Structures are given as C-alpha cells and as structure tokens.
Amino acid sequence: MAQSLSQDMQNPQGAMRPKAGMPPVLRAFLWAAIGFIVVNAFVVIVDPFRGHPFVTGPSVTLGWVGAVIGWLLGIGSWESVILPTFGYATSWRERHSGWRRYFEYSTDHKVIALQYMMFAVGGFLIAGAVAMLMRYELMTPYMTIFHYPSNYLTAVGIHGTIMMFSFGTVMMIGGLGNYFVPLMIGARETVFSRLSGIGVWLVPVGILTVLFSPLLGAWTTGWRGYQPLAGQDANGIIFYWLGVLALTMSSLIVALNLVATVMFRRAPGLTWGRLPLFVWGQVTVNLLMLIWFPEIQTTFVMGLLDHIVPMNFFTATGSPMTFLMLFWLFGHPEVYIIAVPAFALWNEIIPVMAQKSLFGRQWAVIGLVFVMMLSGLVWAHHMFTNIRNSEILPFSFFTEMISIPTGFAYMAAIGTLWKSKIRLTTPALLVLMSMFNFLIGGLTGVFLADPIVNLQLHDTFWVVGHFHYTIIGSMVFTAMAATYYWLPKWSGRMANETWAKTLSIITFLAFNLTFSQFFLLGLHGMNRWVPAYPSYLQPMNFEVSIFAFILGASFLAHIIFIGWTWVNGKTCGENPWNAKTPEWFTTSPPPRENFPAQPEIVAGFYTYGEGAKPAVSQSALSELAVTREPELES
Amino acid sequence: MSSQLQELGLGKEMTPRNHRAVRFGFLFLVATQIVPYVVLYEAKYVYAGSYVSPRASQILGVVTVAIMLISLALAWSVKGIIHTTGDQEAIRRRLKMTLLSGILAIMTTFYQWSGRYTAPESRFGEMFYIITGADILYAVVGIIILWAAISRAGRISLKPERYWIADAARYFWTFVTLAWIGSWIAVYLL
C-alpha cells in the first residue's frame, strides 16, 4: 500500500485529482437536504394540506425521493456516472489507496464490499441497541421507558426492519458476497461495478430512514408492515416503506451484479461443477432476490399509496389478506436469502479446517438449490390462523418438506466432520456453534409447521425464539465465523485465538441462555407485540433480559476486537488456513484487479488427501507479472 | 473528448465477452421488472375481476397503445442504422422521435387522469390509476435512458462500445411498450 501511495504522489496523473472540495459524504448530505427541501416545498405548494404544515404525507414521500437522488449524486455518481453516461468529459479519478476511498463512490468490488459491511455493522449496532431497549422494557410487567404501547411497537419495528433488511441481507450478500464471489471465481472485476458502487450508498439511506421514522409518528406493525394495522398508523409507517424500498433496491443491485459476474467472469477452467460452495449459495439466493424483491417493492408501493393518496388496496375496506399473502410470498424466501449463504459457508470452512475432502459435494449444492425452489411454496405457514383448513395442509407439508434439502447441507457438513481431525480454530468453533443453534432453530420450526401446535403457539415468544435461533444461529454466527476466517485476507493479520475463542464462547452461552428461555416463555403464555404482560412471567423475563445485555455486550466486544486486530493483529502469510479456493492465491489484501494475472483453475477445491492437486494454477507469465505488480496496480 | 473518456476507463473498448455480459445483465434486470406487473395484474384480478368501467375511454386507450407501438418501431429502426452506416446523427434523430412519442403517450394518459374518466375511489379506478401510474414511471425511466443515449451519441463515437447505449435504450423501450400493451389488455379488455 505504501508503495502505491508514494507512486500516487509522484504520478502527475495522480496529482490531477480535482480540487479537494467538500468530502463526498458531507456533500451528499447537503445535496440530499437541498433535494428534500426543494421537492417537499414544491409538493406542499401544489397540494397544500389544511393548516398548511410544511411536511405532509405526500410531500415527505416525494421529498424523500428528491433527497435520495441528491444523496446519490452528491456521493460521487454525478461526476463518475451521470456525466460520462451522457457523454460529457469529467475530471473524476478513482482513489486506489487510503481510508478516504471507503467514504466515497468506488468501483472496486472490495471497497464496495467493505462499505456494505461497514453499514451492515452500523445497522446491527443500531438495531441491537434498540433490542436492548426492548429487553429493558420487558424486565418489568408494566411500562417503564416506553410510555405508550405504540412507542414500544415502533421500537420492535425498527429493530426487525433494520436487522432483516440492512444486516441479514446486507452483511452476507452485499458484504461477504461482493468481496469473495469475484475472488473465488478468479474474476478481476465485476460486471456492473459502477452500478454496484452507487447501490451501496442506498444502505445508509435506508437505515437512517427507518431509524428516523418516529419523527413522523409511531407505527405498530413490526418489520412486516401488516395491514390493516398499517393503514391506521401515523405517518411513521411511510418511512418504513421508503427505507425498505431503498434497502431492497441496494440488495437487488448486488444480486444482479453477482449473477452476471458468476455467469461471465469465471476464470478459465472454473466450470459450474467446480464452482465453490459459497458462490453456489450466493447465486441461488441472488436468483431468489431477483424474483422476490421487485414483488415486495410493488406491494410496499401499493401500501404507501394506500396511506398517502389514499387508496384502499389493503386497508380494512380493501383486502388485508392480499397484503399478508404478498408479504409472505417475499417474506419466507427472505429468510432463506439470509440463511442459505450460511449453509454454504459451513461447507466452505469445515473442509479447510479439517483438511478433509467435502462429503457429498453435489448433494450439498442440490440442497441449496432445492431450498431455494421450495422456499417459494411455504409462505402461508405464517398465516395458519387466518386461512382455511384445506389451505393449511399443503403449506404444512411443504414446510416440513423443506427440512430435507436443508438437511443435505447439514449432512454434508456432518459427513465431512466424521472421523476428521478438525483444527478447532475460531472459525471452525463458530461454525459448529452455528450448526448447533440452527439445529434447535430448525427443530422448533418443524413444531411450528404442524398446524395444531402452530395454532397454539402463534404469536407467542416460542415463535420469537424460533426465528432468532434460525437467523442469529445460522446467519450471525456464520458471519462471525466468516469474519474470523477471512480477516487475514482483508488485513493480512490473524486474530488472537485465545481472545477470539473466549469471546465466541461467551456469545454462544449468552445467546443460548437468552433465546432458549424464549421457548419456555412462549409455552407459559408470553405474547409477542406486548410491552406489558401478566406479572407471573416477570422473573423469567428479568433474567432473559440480563442474558440479552450480556449477549449485546459480547457482540460489541467482537466488533471492537476485530477492529483492533485489523490494525494491530499479528501478521500472517497469504494462505494461513491452507485453503484451496482462489481467493487465497493472491496477496492479502488483494490488489486492485484481484490477481496479478488471470489465474486458471485446474482441479476441484474440495479434495484433500492423497493425489489431491492444487486447484489454482498461475502460469509463468503471471509469475513474471507479479514482479511488475505496482505498475499494473497504477 | 472520447480519448479523455478512454483515459478514465469509462469509454473503453467493449470486448465481445464484455458486451454479452452487460447485455445479459441488463436484459435480466429488465426481466425482473416483469414481476411488479404480475403483482399489479394479479391485484386487478383480485379486486376488480374482469370488470371494465364503461366510463373508461376505450378510444384514448387504443390511441395510447398505438402511439407506443409507433415509438417502438422507431426505436427498432435504430438497429438497421447501427448495422449499416452507423450514422450517429441518424440514430439521434430516431431516438429523439421515440422519446417524443413516448412523451405524447404519457400526455394522453395524463389527459385521462385529469379528466377523471374513471372514478379513483372505485375498485376498477384504483387499479386503473396504479397500473397506468406504473406504466408512466417505467416510461419516465425509459425516457431518461433515451435522453442519455441521444446525448452520448452526440458527443462521443459509439463504435468502440458497440453502440451499447443505443441498444440498451432500445431494449428498455421495448419492455416499456410491452408493459403498456399488457396494461392496456389488463385494464381495458380483461
């Protein structure tokens, strides 16, 4: 990095950067403010409301659109995308080094990925803090910090929405997917790098929009925006719809970019049969996203129009059930969008840590693909209390059915672990913890798939426990495993094993002590969506909250520890885990174009032991290119 | 000017493989935008069945679709120019005519909106306004792409990039036209 920095200084072209001006993020905020004020003012002039308030439902919606356009242009897409697309000359230069490139528009998929992860972690901390407030409220059976039930429900909605749309989908797909899919297929760039560079900046827009929704009034629907409840909410619900619109748009761009990249940028020799598991996981969920995100966006626009025009699509005089159906048609695949990359990562990390061939590789891939296909057939199991008996049965059947392909991914991992001498490193430990948690999440899901049990447990804390086990258990623990696994790739540094393992064990215990009691609470009659509850439930709620605070603190400790390691950790070699996938066959961190020369894939990535060949081959020409790397980089 | 863009890596020559990749991705994105229309048409079926309000102007509906078909023919005539002379001025003229007919189609729809031909508070009216509204939204996006293509074709040579932006505008306008025809069938006929 130092080399390229000094080169930048000597290079007259590098010195030709446009005059320093305002930092892009600051300019983006300014342009967003201008966009909002101009459009908002225009709307309230054209369409005034009685009493002449400056901000009305319609004006804030269109003003928000103006603000987003201003924000995206201000962050750098005006000079770097709009001007050149329209054929105008531009003085924009991409920054290739230094921390500032993470705070402006970039076309490097690695920078974009780290931006996604930065925003995802930010969202995680915000939504986590909101969860802590919820748990504080639930320590007592009466209301304390929230003065009205609607305030508590707004907090629940903000927690769920930010966690699902700006962490669940963003961390694994926008973050890890954007960073490692191109590297793992030996690509030197992505297909839609400019679009992707714009898309990442929709994430902070979405997070801030949802976070500041209480400015417009409380909303009571949770992350699902249920109708007809949403129809009678205050205007805060508008910011829920708009925030989710921004976040899903961002993820849609990631999905498109990754699918096109996997289709067209695979290294020579990387056939579909050799495609790494993680890439398979990403491609399957990207396809799900490309189908279901436009669907939910349309549904949310209809809900939004119900509120601001007003229309009557989903309101009490319309058809609320249509909203429920349309929501869960997207909502259940969304759960798999979050979980499937985690299943894929288990089978990515375990063979490396065990140095043992992946068991039943094809079946692991088939499992991922079938989970993807079945995920569109189970939506109505969220509505067993609302639908007819004859409709319940098929959904119950498919829901129980989906545990079979999920089991394929699970069994491939178990088969690989069987009689292996696994190195119990932090990533391996976290994967095993993730598998344990997901097993509990999955088994409790089978209970819920059963109509008779479901009708009893519907809307109790049992359900809350179930989905926290599946989402945190599969996704968050695996994302942490992946972070420790790939930290040497990003930073060239290894985390201290003792510290990392201690923290992981604390997280695991705190997580299980918190959420396993959710099942018991649910069975004892603790309902969801209520800030006040019968006092006999208080002792257990009180201790659950204590464990939840420990869990929150342990996540924070992980984030601080990883940040510290990034800067101060012990340096390590380029392939510290002795892995076979292509991302390890370049420097850490990788150069601008990922590989000094186009690598070639000559064997599968998951065969170890006798007769296993190295999978990545770099020709003599590329060896030569390595010596000239700085030139290539500039 | 084009050399300056090349220097920036923004107007670089498009290899056949890159061209295929970009075209695949763009068409895939366009294909995903069928999904919102599936939702809307399905909602029309749920809410209004096959009912068509007698107050909906059948004539204006047909006129709008006819204008869009003309604009589509204009957009596709660009393909011939690309494959023969590659005359960018001619391409710009055709794209401008496409753009203008697109605006005309939007105005026709706005005329129906402003005349309150259909009552917005009825079940049919709600679906009429949201489906034609979606049509207009996509047409505006199509017009911005056409505008970009016209502007770019007037400033730099499109040959090294295989006239991609003109093709992209054409592909997207095809989607817009097909969507308008689909909406016409869903709103006025079925």
Image (cartoon, grey):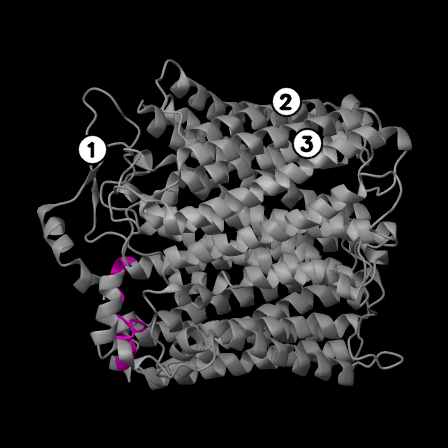
Tag on residue A614? 1
Task: Return the residue at label 3.
Answer: A514
Q: CA distance from mark 2 to mark 1?
A: 39 Å
Q: Amino acid at mark 1?
A: Pro
As helix, strand or loop, the secondary structure at mark 1 comes to loop
Identity of the residue drawn at 60% across and 38% down:
A376
Q: Residues within 10 Å of mark 3 (few under 14, many from 20)?
A: many
Nearer to us in this view, A448 or B179: A448
Asked if badge 3 and badge 2 are on a common chain, one would say yes
- Labels 2 and 1 touching (C-beta < 8 A): no
Which disc number belongs to residue A523? none
Using a 10 Å C-alpha cutoff, classify the residue at mark 1 as few (fewer than 14 neighbours), some (14 to 19) or many (20 or more): some
Q: Nearer the viewer, residue A116 or A322?
A: A116
Kindly tell me whether residue A381 is visible in this rendering.
no
Residue numbers of the magenta segment: B4-17
Q: Which chain letter matches label 1? A: A
- Of all chains, the one bearing label 2 is A
Mark with earlier residue (1, 3): 3
Magenta segment: does it hold A485? no
Find the distance from the CA under tag 3 to the CA under tag 2. 18 Å
**Residue A443: which disc?**
2
Q: Earlier in the sequence, mark 3 or mark 2?
A: 2
Circle 3 sits in a helix, a strand or a loop, which is it?
helix
Kind of residue sitting beneath label 3: Thr
What percent of the width, then of the height, locates residue A313? Answer: 79, 56
Estimate the x, y position of residue A13 in percent, counting from the top left.
24, 78
What amino acid type should be assigned to the residue bearing mark 2?
A: Leu
